[in-house]
Amino acid sequence: MGFGISPRQPETDYNVPVKRILLFAGLGIVLLVIAGAAIVGSAFMGRQAITDGFEINGIRIVRDGFASVAVLPMGEGEVALVDAGNDPSGEAIRAELSRRGLGPEAVKAVLITHGHGDHIAAIPLFPNAEAMALAAEVPLIEGRAGARGPLTRFFPPNPTGIRVARTLQDGDTVMLGQTPVRVFAVPGHTDGSAAYLVNGVLFLGDSADATTEGELRGAPWVFSDDQAQNRASLVRLQQRLAEEGAGVQAMAFAHSGVLIQGLAPLAAFAQQNP
Ligand SMILES: [Zn+2]
């Protein structure tokens, strides 16, 4: 009547290892997702917060979500920007221009630290702005090439409609009105990542971050083309600035707050990364 022990089905022997394999595969995927989330999360953890409206030497930091933009006065009714943020509607930048009684046409130049989308989004809003970047960064900014980082490589290149009007070289000095801007190549986060020194403030874009402890740390691996090159570029930059007595008073970062200890945080970084 079928109440006895039913004979083992041949597939039962087969199913047990399959279930075990599926279980381990599932656990593996879960662990990979957790590890991935931890790696991406660590890039954001421990960063000193961006202070909206922070001013130093006539330069003002404008927070645009998780990115920042700097506004540099160029002369009567004219400004330049360092980067143009993450927001294509440029709300935070336009609010800052309005506060100064200016409109979008007052922006005469944008110094681009690098071509990731969260630093260039509002550039098309400024009809008179001359976009400037290192030559090596132009394809990424214009959307003709993609980035090569562990995560950024999955974002296919897309035409941005942005045209870099002036290509810069390492060591250039650009005049914004009466204000000289020194240009330094710091490849690694991207091929054409630039640092700019203006009025004693060194803009590092995503090539470095300020930690909550007030230390400088390099670009996060997961978003960077070449982390080792980024570290080497920061060390070399420190040597150059120290040798020429460049008069760095502060360092500004695209995703973290301004450090006002001169070159010291970069010198400490260089000492830890010989
Ligand atoms: Zn970036």
Image (cartoon, grey):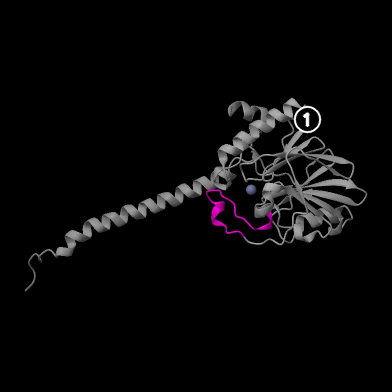
Q: Report the residue at 36% width, 55% height from top.
A: 26
Q: Is residue 16 above or below residue 176?
A: below
State whether residue 80 appears in this view: yes
What percent of the width, then of the height, locates residue 130?
81, 53
What percent of the width, then of the height, locates residue 222?
54, 46
- The range drawn in magenta is 141-157
SS at mark 1? Answer: loop
For the C terminus, give its image quadrant. top right
Q: Main secondary structure of the magenta part?
A: loop
**Residue denoted by label 1:** 246
Q: Is residue 158 left or right of residue 34?
A: right
State whether residue 265 appears in this view: no
Q: Report the residue at 66% width, 62% height from top.
A: 159
Is 171 contained in the magenta span?
A: no
Q: Give amino acid for label 1.
A: Ala
Is 148 contained in the magenta span?
A: yes
